[in-house]
Image (spheres, rainbow, N blue to C red):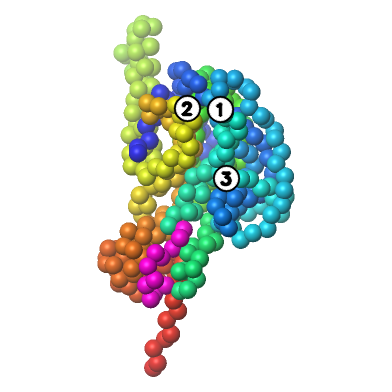
Amino acid sequence: MRLDLAGLRTAPAQVWGGIRLVPLVRDAPVPGLRLHREQYGEGYGVVDVAPHTVYTSYIPHGFVADWSGAGDAAAYGTQLRGEQAAASTSARVPVEAVPVRVHRRMARRQGRRRLRFLPLHLALEGYLALHFGGPAVAWEEWSQRALRRGLSPRVEEAYAGLEVQGLGDALRVFEIHPGQCGLLLYTADALTAAFAVPHPDDYRALHATLVHDLYGELVHHYALLSAPVPDFVPRLDAAAVSSTADLRAALAGQRAAWADFHAGTMAAGLLAPAYAARTVHRAGDFTLLRFLPAFRPRTENHVGEAITTADGRLAYLKTFRLSEAQTRRGHLLSTLAAHDWSLPRAAEALGRSEADLRTRLAGAGFAALLKHRPHAPR
């Protein structure tokens, strides 16, 4: 699949220090679907995703997709409580010890026409589960742990939005445009996250949740270390404007140029690549799915989740930009899986020696999967 922002247009960007927010505006809401927030408080969540497998992370809230036409009928503020200790597949966030809340599945029906899902965690769990089972063939290079347990546990790190310098202030002071249904977030003019919802009222209700989302290493570092980014100020040719109609035409031209520049340049790393998508749930005319990139090193790589309409339009979108290290891990795992986890064949595909591939696997944090080789006697 490819991400298409048809039905969404970019409004003028707003800048706060190293943060640039580009509003996404709909001329008309997506009919038949609304999103609501389900509040869980400040704490870790444990999600049972499969027998003997759980996902743990900082999960402050869930979203409820409602296609019943009831508008504001979805539950708000539900508190889920409980405790569970288990080995976990986890996305870790550096926060203090807090209560643990237990959830069943990433996406779960709540009645006939409502679906609760955990925003962004749905996408991150897809990345963490990438080739989670480990080697399918008992090659002699792999340890018994790799053959018996695969990649369990799989752990990655992310940052809560509260840790991203300037993000909270930017979300608090920036103007919400009429018809705004989302935004694109840049730090140091690197696209780091995209968010879109079906209705402007949904966005106003969910705007503040962005500061509680998870963000990648690049977002945190760029926001902390970058200088303020320049604002893009339109410049009209005064000599070409002699009437109100001329002014309207000049403004329309600037808006079109901004949209073309944004889609073709600033957001090209998100919109141009093809993604591998997996359907999570079908609900009436809507499909909830999550997607993974091709894991090309030294390029932008985003994971995400979306709700699409019957004709393929995006009703909901949330993305997470992977760090270069996370991209390398995904690339290594995908290459190994494509070659049946044979180290010699995978090394040949990567244009490297088997010894070099072993070094790369160890550097990526997969050393425990490899069988220990004793040093040759001197």
Viewer-side residue, 123 vs 357: 123
Residue at image location 35% in from the left, 37% down from the top: 2
Q: Residue 332, percent across and down?
A: 38, 61
**Bounds of the magenta span?**
132-142
Residue at the disc numbered 2: 284
Q: Is residue 35 above or below residue 164?
A: above
Q: Quadrant of residue 54?
A: bottom right
The three-letter code of the residue at mark 1 reads Arg
Q: Pick the quarter of the image with the N terminus.
A: top left
Residue at the disc numbered 3: 105
The three-letter code of the residue at mark 3 reads Arg
Residue 141 lies within the magenta run: yes
Q: Quadrant of residue 212?
A: top right
Q: Quadrant of residue 314?
A: top left
Residue at image location 48% in from the left, 20% down from the top: 31
Q: Residue 347, percent across and down?
A: 31, 67
- Dot 1 or dot 2, earlier in sequence: 1
Q: Residues within 10 Å of mark 2 (few under 14, many from 20)?
A: few
Q: Is residue 305 visible?
A: no
Residue 105 lies within the magenta run: no
Q: Residue 106, percent across and down?
A: 56, 43
Q: Residue 195, percent across and down?
A: 50, 34
SS class of the residue under badge 1? loop
Residue at the disc numbered 1: 113
Viewer-side residue, 218 vs 213: 213
Q: Is residue 293 visible?
A: yes
What's the CA distance linking mark 3 and mark 2?
20 Å
Q: Are marks 1 and 2 in contact (CB under 8 Å)?
A: yes
The three-letter code of the residue at mark 2 reads Gly
User: In the picture provided, is 350 more to the left or to the right than 165?
Assistant: left
